[in-house]
């Protein structure tokens, strides 16, 4: 039984699940391999080691769920924390992507709403799909975004 099964209510349906994109690990790791083969072991090498480890931990220990009632973000390594945002409290969603983010499919999602502060999900994989899934839950249309 996963943590998702424990946190979801009986009448709640999972719409989409996302994590930080693997590019946050792969790019520093690729630089690390290039520097290792070139024989560069200075400050830049160790900086890439730290970035690769931080990216690996972030991609393993961050997860975002969208259900038909709320958005749940799980994060943490030693202490697992959950942040829940009710769907009906969200007013606006902004997805920001630069050209590199569009290439990898990542992005920064910022949520605005009543009674919640500005919440950001950084380097989230499939950012536009996650944004459209949130909008589909906010819409009053009976047919949702993913049903065709």
Image: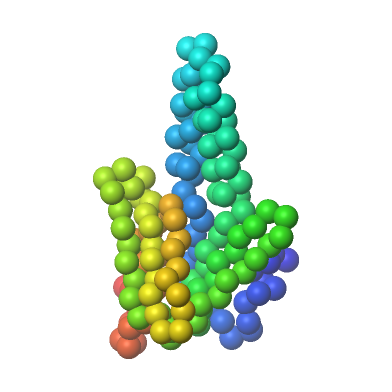
Q: Residue at x 44, y 63 (%)?
A: 120
Display coloring? rainbow
Is 139 rendered above or below residue 56? Answer: below
Residue shown at the point (53%, 18%) measured from the top left: 42
Q: Residue at point 46% right, 26% down?
A: 31
Q: Is residue 127 visible?
A: yes
The extreme front residue here reads: 43
Residue 9 in percent (x, y) is at 63, 82
Please tell me in which quadrant of the rendered image residue 74 appears: bottom right
Residue 48, placed above or below residue 136: above
Q: Residue at x 54, y 43 (%)?
A: 55
Residue 122, above or below 148: above
Relative horizontal placement of residue 24, taking residue 91 as reference (left or right): right
Q: Classify 124 as above or below 135.
A: above
Residue toward you, 80 or 117: 117
Question: Farthest residue toward the top?
Answer: 39
Q: Is residue 14 visible?
A: no
Give the quadrant of the C terminus. Answer: bottom left
Residue 101 horizontal side relative to residue 82, left or right: left
Look at the image and tell me in which quarter the N terminus lies: bottom right
Residue 102 x/y as whole percent: 30, 49
Could you say which is closer to the camera, residue 116 or residue 102? 116
> Which residue is the extreme one toward the left?
99
Q: Position of residue 134 (x, y in %)?
A: 39, 73
Q: Position of residue 44 (x, y in %)?
A: 49, 25
Figure disc tally: 0
The part of the image, by quadrant, that contains residue 100 is top left
């Amino acid at each position: 039984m996963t943590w998702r099964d424990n946190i979801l209510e009986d009448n709640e349906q999972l719409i989409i699940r996302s994590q930080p994109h693997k590019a946050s690990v792969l790019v520093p790791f690729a630089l690390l391999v290039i520097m290792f083969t070139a024989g560069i072991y200075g400050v830049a090498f160790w900086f890439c080691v730290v970035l690769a480890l931080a990216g690996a931990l972030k991609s393993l220990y961050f997860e975002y769920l969208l259900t038909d009632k709320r958005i749940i973000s799980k994060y943490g390594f030693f202490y697992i924390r959950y942040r829940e945002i009710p769907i009906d409290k969200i007013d606006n969603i902004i997805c920001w992507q630069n050209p590199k983010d569009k290439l990898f499919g990542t992005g920064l999602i910022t949520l605005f709403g009543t009674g919640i502060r500005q919440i950001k999900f950084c380097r989230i994989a499939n950012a536009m799909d996650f944004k459209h899934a949130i909008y589909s839950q906010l819409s009053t249309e009976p047919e949702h975004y993913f049903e065709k």
